[in-house]
Image (tube, grey):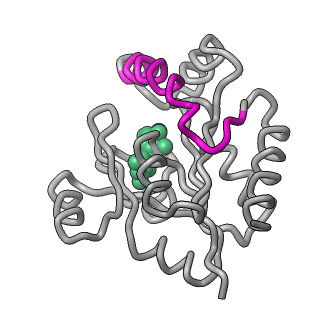
């Protein structure tokens, strides 16, 4: 059986990665999603095992030690990592898998999986718009928003290391572009 492709979406906090991935999964419920492990506290409405596997720092480090996390990164004071087994299982079963990763996470994944992986950088239409979205969603304290915005400036500079750059100005348009990218990757 042909292995599923691995589609990793990165971009600054607030650009809409979560919403874009949600939309892609609505359009094609056959897509798999790699649920990450994190030491960050759950946000309101987040569900254990669906949004993330929420772990303590010690639990997370033990998973890394045991080789159960294939890549991980530290972002604004917390660990985030991809559990190895579910990703391998989905891909082996021919399921195309979506991941929401930091920039280093996507770049490592590309190194590991080569042509089986497609990396997409989601860019905001402008930095001002990003600031507006991140402040407007109200999920983080002001101090965390500022840290995330400071990261965003460095992150946007890395966009050209990705296979594709998509601008998330109009959500439906961005989703359509990503669907086209995925369909093209599947033909190759
Ligand atoms: P958030 O706290 O907003 O849910 O996520 C913060 C950042 O962590 C986002 O940029 C997201 O893409 C990234 N992230 C989530 N899960 C993983 C993961 O498993 N590995 C890596 N490298 N980054 C992740």
Residue 7 point in image, percent of width and height: 61, 57
Location of residue 33 by image quarter: bottom right
Nearest the camera: 1 or 167? 1
Q: Residue 40's image quarter?
A: top left
Q: Quadrant of the C terminus?
A: bottom right
Q: Residue at x 62, y 11 (%)?
A: 128
Ligand 1 in which quarter: top left
Q: Position of residue 139 (x, y in %)?
A: 49, 31
- Would you say 29 lies left or right of 139 here? right
Task: Using the image, determine if residue 93 lies above or below residue 36.
Answer: below
Q: Position of residue 29 (x, y in %)?
A: 74, 68
Question: Quick check: can you spot residue 43?
Answer: no
Residue sitting at x 35%, y 63%: 70
Tell whether position 37 is magenta. Answer: no
Residue 82 image offset from top left, x and y in percent = 40, 60
Which residue occupies the extreme top position in the image? Answer: 128
Q: Chief secondary structure of the magenta span? A: helix
| Count of marks placed on residues | 0
Q: Nearer the viewer, residue 136 or 155?
A: 155
Left or right: residue 181 versus residue 44 is right
- Residue located at (79% from left, 67% from top): 187
Q: Residue at x 64, y 35 (%)?
A: 122
Q: Which residues are magenta?
A: 144-166
Q: Report if residue 172 is visible in the image.
A: yes
Q: Quadrant of the N terminus?
A: bottom right
Residue furthest out toward the bottom: 1
- Viewer-closest of 42 and 90: 90
């Amino acid at each position: 059986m042909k292995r599923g492709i691995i589609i990793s979406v990165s971009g600054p906090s607030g650009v809409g990665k979560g919403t874009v991935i949600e939309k892609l999964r609505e359009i094609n419920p056959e897509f798999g999603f790699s649920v990450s492990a994190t030491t960050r506290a759950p946000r309101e409405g987040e569900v254990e095992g669906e949004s993330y596997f929420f772990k303590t720092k010690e639990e997370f480090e033990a998973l890394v030690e045991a080789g159960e996390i294939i890549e991980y990164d530290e972002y604004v004071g917390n660990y985030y990592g991809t559990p190895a087994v579910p990703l391998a299982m989905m891909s082996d079963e021919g399921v195309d898998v979506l991941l929401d990763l930091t920039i280093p996470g996507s770049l490592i994944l590309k190194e590991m999986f080569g042509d089986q992986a497609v990396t997409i950088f989601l860019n905001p239409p402008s930095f001002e718009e990003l600031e507006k979205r991140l402040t407007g969603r109200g999920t983080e304290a002001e101090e965390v928003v500022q840290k995330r915005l400071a990261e965003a400036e460095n992150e946007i500079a890395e966009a050209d290391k990705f296979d594709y750059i998509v601008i998330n100005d109009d959500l439906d348009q961005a989703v359509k572009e990503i669907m086209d990218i995925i369909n093209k990757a599947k033909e190759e």
